[in-house]
Amino acid sequence: MRNGRHVADIRISNLSCVHSTVNIVKITLENEAQKFLNKNQCKDIIVYLNRPSQLRTMKIDEMFNQYSWSYTLLQHYERHPALLNVEYWEIKIPSLSRNIYIMKKINPNSSITRIGMICILAGELWYLRQIMLKCPTTSWKDAKSHNEIVYTSFQEAAVSRGLVVDKRKKKKLRSKKWYHFLHHLSYVVSL
């Protein structure tokens, strides 16, 4: 641990790349995020869902690999002429009394972003994580939507998107395959 940040040593095919920080983005459901907003606080997922239109095509880990956020614009963006053209946005989040600044990281290779692990037994939270890993979303409602259909749960939406397999359908499919296999086997044996 260096300066309160975790150090990750990533090794891929004998190549080594040291990242000074690992940013963990925690996925939360809407009611949990609302509790933070009620305290006039913000979370990564709230910033992500309220990101500027220029960043709408980015998945959550992609965005936080390249951008960070703060309640104040970092002074080096205002004082250094070389940074005046670096991307940053000021956004207003409803029910938050202060503005949020999303800033392009000056050196994005110095950190890596991961979405926090969630046990499959967490239910809806786990399905929301699967959706956010694979799809750029703009709201919790958007995460529950697919092909213009708004589902009642993240599970239904994840199954509809093909991100997870519905075990009931898989079991039915397996039993059909087993039935056809036995049917063909009985035909072969009767010959």
Image (tube, rainbow, N blue to C red):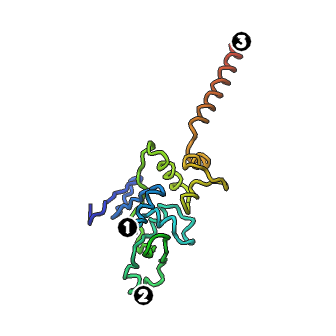
- Marker disc for residue 169: none
Describe residue 149's horizontal placement relative to residue 167 as left or right.
Answer: right
In this view, the residue in front, 187 or 133, is 133
Give the Cα separation between the discs numbered 2 and 3: 86 Å
Q: Position of residue 88 (x, y in %)?
A: 47, 77
Q: Are marks 1 and 3 in contact (CB under 8 Å)?
A: no
Q: Which residue is mark 3?
A: 190
Q: Secondary structure at mark 1?
A: helix
* Residue 138 percent coordinates (x, y): 56, 63
Q: Please, what is the three-letter code of the amino acid marked with disc 3?
A: Ser
Q: Is residue 37 left or right of residue 142?
A: left
Image quarter of residue 97: bottom left
State the quadrant of the N terminus.
Answer: bottom left
Residue corresponding to mark 1: 110
Q: Nearer the viewer, mark 2 or mark 3?
A: 2
Is residue 6 found left or right of 160 in the rendered image? left
Amino acid carrying label 2: it is Pro
Which is nearer the N-term, disc 1 or disc 2? 2
The tag earlier along the polypeptide, 1 or 3, is 1
Question: Which residue is tagged 2?
Answer: 81
